[in-house]
Image (cartoon, helix red, strand yellow):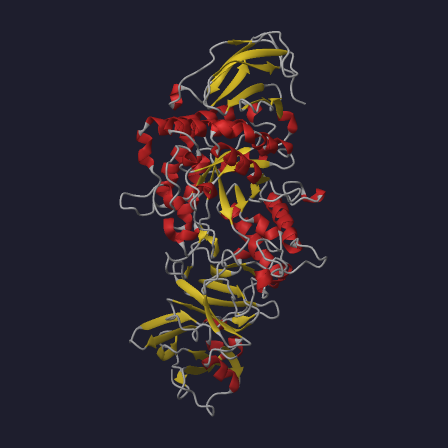
Amino acid sequence: MKKPSISVLDEESIKITEARHHDPFSVLGRRVKDNQFCIKVYMPNAETVCLSHNGPIFQRITGTDFFECSVEKDTLPKHYQLSWTDKSGNTHLSYDPYDFPVQLPEFDQHLFGEGKHWHVYQKLGGHLHSADGIDGVLFAIWAPNAGRVSVVGDFNHWDGRCNPMRSLGGGGIWELFIPGLTAGCLYKFEILNRYSNEVLLKTDPYGQQFEFRPNTSSIVVNENSYEWLDHQWLTERKNRDWLHAPMSIYEVHLGSWRRDKLGNFLNYRDMADQLSEYVKQLGFTHIELLPITEHPLDASWGYQTTGYFAPTSRFGSPDDFRYFVDTFHQNGIGVILDWVPAHFPKDAFGLARFDGSALYEHEDPRKGEHRDWGTLIYNYGRNEVKNFLLASAIFWLEEFHLDGLRVDAVASMLYLDYSREEGDWVANKYGGNENLEAIDFFRELNTVTHEQHPGTVIMAEESTSWPQVTRPTWAGGLGFSMKWNMGWMNDILVYMKEDPVHRRFHHDQLTFGMLYAFTENFALPFSHDEVVHGKGSMLNKMPGDEWQRFANLRLLYTMMFTYPGKKLLFMGIEFGQGTQWNFNQSLDWYVLEYPLHQGIQTLVKDLNRLYKEYPALYHFDFDHHGFEWIDCHDYEQSVISYRRKGKDQELIIVLNFTPVVRENYRIGVPVAGNYQEIFCSDSNSYAGSNIANDNVLSEPIPWMNLPHSVKLTLPPLGGLILKLRPNSLGTIIPAS
C-alpha cells in the first residue's frame, strides 16, 4: 500500500487507510457535493476503477488507494456498480458495499441486547441476503470493545482494509452487506481492540459451517435448502407423553463408531443409513451423539466446541447432517445431541477474548477459567452471552429437528467452587457457592426450549445432590426433563467389580439407589465416561473368568433394563467390546464373530424388545407406584427381587449376583397363578448355561409380606423376568 500524505487525506480518510475507522460509511460511498454525487471508494487491490463497464473513470487520489468520481445526480442509479481492474489485470464488476443503508432492524438489535432473541442466529453471522433486489451476504457480529471490525475472506485476499464494517451504536453490533458474494465463500472477522490496538482474527461465533480441520474459516451456507420428510415424526413427537413412554438411548461418537476400510471418517449420509439400520435392529428408541458441534481437536471428542451453530465438517455439510436426522426420524428413532454450554476452549481463532476483552468469559480467572480442563467459563450474567447459548439450543432443535439436548457438565456450572481450592473462587452476592446466573440460565433454557419445541427433552449430566434438577421452574426447580443417575451408576459398577464372594458385604450398593430413585426424573447411564481414561471396558470391569465376566455383564444389563429410569448405553458395550473406547479408530466389530459377544448383543436386543413391549417396565419410570421390593435383604446370597408395575400389568424380577445355582429359592408373589419366565439372562441364546424355569405355579404360602409364593431355580450370575400367565388364577391390582 502506498503511504498516504497527511496533506492529501483528511483525518477520517487516514483512519480508513490505517484500518481503524468505526464508521467507514461516513467516508466511503456517495456524497452530495455541488448538486452532484461524489463517490469515494477505497480499494487497495485495484489499479483502475470506473462506473459500470464504460462509465466515468475514477481518479486515484495521489499516493493512496482512494478513488473518487463525480457524476450528475440524475445519472446515478439507486445502486451503482464498479468496474475495476486488479493488479494482475483481471477485470471485476461489483456493487459498492458502502452504497447500502443499515440492513439489521433495530428491533433485532434490541431483542439481542435484552437476551431474548431466540433466532438471533438468523441475524448475526454471515447470511445470504438480498438488499433492494441485489443478492449478496450480510455480515453482522457482536464486538462492543472493538474499534474496528472487518470482514476478510477469499474474496478480498484476507485484507482487513478492504471491507471494514459499520458500528451500529452502543449495542456493540457491527454490520456490512457485501453484494455479489455467494454461498461457499470463506470468511473471518478481523477485529481491532479499541483500547490496546491489538488485532485479532476470529471465526464467526454464529457460523453455520466451517472448513475441515485444521483450517478454521467460516463458510457461508445456502440455508433452508433441505426438504424434510419427517413431518409425521414431528407431529407425533409434539403429542408424545415421553414421561410414560420407553426411552432406550444408544450413545454414539460418530468419528469412531465405524470407519471405512482406509480408516477415514464416514459421511453423515453413509452413517445415517448404516447406523439407523443397526440401531433399529437392536431396538433402541433414540441415539445420543457426542458433540458434533464444530471443534478443532479430535481428542476433545467434541466437548471443546468452537462452532455452536455448525455440525462438524468432518462428516460432511449441514444438509448431510439434516439427512442424517431425517433418516433416523423416518425409521422411528429420535436423535439427541450432547451440548456444551459450560465452557469453551482458549483457541486464538475462537471466542476467547473475542474482541480483545473478556467478552464471552469472565475477566477474573477465579470465575472465568476451568483450571482442570484448560478452558474458559461463559459469563451467564451477560444478556448477549446468554442469548448466544439459548439461540444455539433453539438452533439445533429447530434447524436440525433434533429431539433433545443432553447438557454437559451441569455441576460445573451450578457451583462457583467446582473443582477449586479455597481462595480460588468468588462467592455470589449472598456469600454462597451457587452460581445464580447459571441457575437463571438453566431455568430460561428449559422454559424456552419446552415452549418453542414441545415434546423435546433436555437432559442434565449432573453428578451432585443439587435438588429439583428435573422439577418445574414454577416449583423452584431447574426445569430439566431428565437427569443422569450418576449415583446409581457409580454404586452398581463398584458393586459389580467385587468378586461375588465379597458382594454380600456390599449389598447396600445394590439397594441404596432406591432411597432417592423418584426424587428426580432419572436416566440410567453407562456412558462413554465409563470406558475411557484407563477405566477399561465394561466387560473388563467384571470379575471372574471369561464366562463369569460375560454372565456378570448380562446380569448388569438385565438390572438396568428392569430398574426405574430411562436407559442409555454407549456404543460398543452393547456387544461387550473387550478394549476401552478409542476415539481414533472404529469399534472392534470383529468380536461379533464370537458367541459370547453375540450373546451380549442379542441380550440387549431382547431387553430392548421387552422394555418396549411391557409398560410395567417404563410407564412409572419416575413414580414410586411402578416399583416395589419383594426382598432387598438377602445379602447372604446376594439376591434381590422386586415388582415392576404398569397401570394394569406387573412383572417380577429376580437377580442372583453369585455364580451359585440356587434351587428352590422362594419369593413372594402378589396373586396366585401360573407364572411364566419371559426372560432369563442365562439362556443359551445369550451363550449362558441355560438354567431356566419352565412352569412356575404359585403356592398358598405367604412369603415376604405377600399372600402367595413360588419356588424358583436361580441361574448363576443371572436375572429372571416373570409374568402371570394369561387366564391364570390371579388378578393383579393396578398401580394407582
Q: Is residue 294 visible?
A: yes
Q: Is the residue 61 above or below the residue 268 in the image?
A: below
Q: Nearer the viewer, residue 435 or 14?
A: 435
- Quadrant position of residue 102: bottom right
Q: Which quadrant: the C terminus?
A: top right
Taking the image as shown, residue 212 lies to the left or right of residue 196, namely left
Q: Nearer the viewer, residue 555 or 184?
A: 555
Q: Nearer the viewer, residue 523 or 277?
A: 523
Taking the image as shown, residue 562 lies to the left or right of residue 324, namely right
Where is residue 288? Give x, y as percent: 47, 41
- Quadrant position of residue 631: top right
Where is residue 454? Give x, y as percent: 59, 40
Q: Which quadrant: the N terminus?
A: bottom left
- For the point 35% across and 46% down, the residue is 267
Q: Is the residue 210 above or below the residue 516 in the image?
A: below
- For the point 54% across and 16% down, the residue is 723
- Quadrant position of residue 116: bottom right
- For the point 64% across and 30% down, the residue is 623
Where is residue 155? Give x, y as percent: 38, 67
Q: Is residue 133 visible?
A: no
Q: Nearer the viewer, residue 704 or 638?
A: 638
